[in-house]
Amino acid sequence: MLEQLTDVPSGVQGLRAIGTVSKRDYDNAFAPLVEDAWQAGDRMRLLYEFGPQFDRLTPAALVADAGLGARYLRLLDGCAVVSDRAWLRDSTSRIGAQMPCPVRVFTVAQHDEALAWLASLPARTVPSHRDIAAAYLGGTVAAICWFVSACTARLHRSPRFKGPR
């Protein structure tokens, strides 16, 4: 489930992932957030929190995020991902390196610091179509590389794996 956070500074939008996050959650919580900002002509400073109650993202949720990315990348002044999960922190750092705006990863204990950082960001200009395309392609490649490495690591931990360890 995705829930919108209401206890965020003005100009910051927040989402909290709880349990399993599905495409329906993106359709019901994230897409309206993006649409509201788009319609109002507002910029987005997004806090995305994956706390201890978060379990997983479905493959369809990842596809929904990529689809929304084509729209919300143009609106983003910055993004803060809050999580203690190593795989989320690592994948966010890799994908964030491709983004046309600042992206930072914070621990759950740094939640308030993440909000303060987002609130302090200057307004950015709308990135060019070329910057958006480069970010989208680079982020997609980074996500695929992370997914392959995660699957490979899981395979190597499997008791059925017969290869070198």
Image: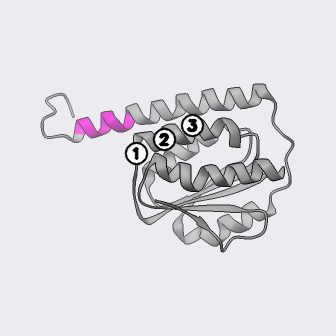
Label 2: element kind? helix
Left or right placement of residue 73 versus residue 151 in this view: right
User: With respect to residue 132, does 85 lie above or below?
Assistant: below
* Badge 3: residue crowd in 10 Å (few <14, some 14–19, many ≥20): some
Task: Tell me if residue 97 can be seen.
Answer: no
Q: CA distance from mark 2 to mark 3?
A: 6 Å
Task: Determine whether label 1 and label 2 are within 8 Å by CB.
Answer: yes
Give the labeled residue for mark 1.
Answer: 58
* Badge 1: residue crowd in 10 Å (few <14, some 14–19, many ≥20): few
Give the labeled residue for mark 2.
Answer: 62
User: With respect to residue 33, does 7 lie above or below?
Assistant: below
Residue range in magenta is 149-156
Coordinates of residue 9 in the picture (x, y in percent): 74, 70
Position of the C terminus by quadrant: top left
Q: Which residue sits at x=50%, y=35%?
A: 143
Name the mark on residue 103: none
Left or right placement of residue 163 versus residue 60 in this view: left
Name the mark on residue 66: 3
Type of the residue with mark 1 = Thr
Task: Tell me if residue 10 can be seen.
Answer: yes
Answer with the quarter of the image where residue 46 lies: bottom right
Coordinates of residue 59 in the picture (x, y in percent): 41, 40
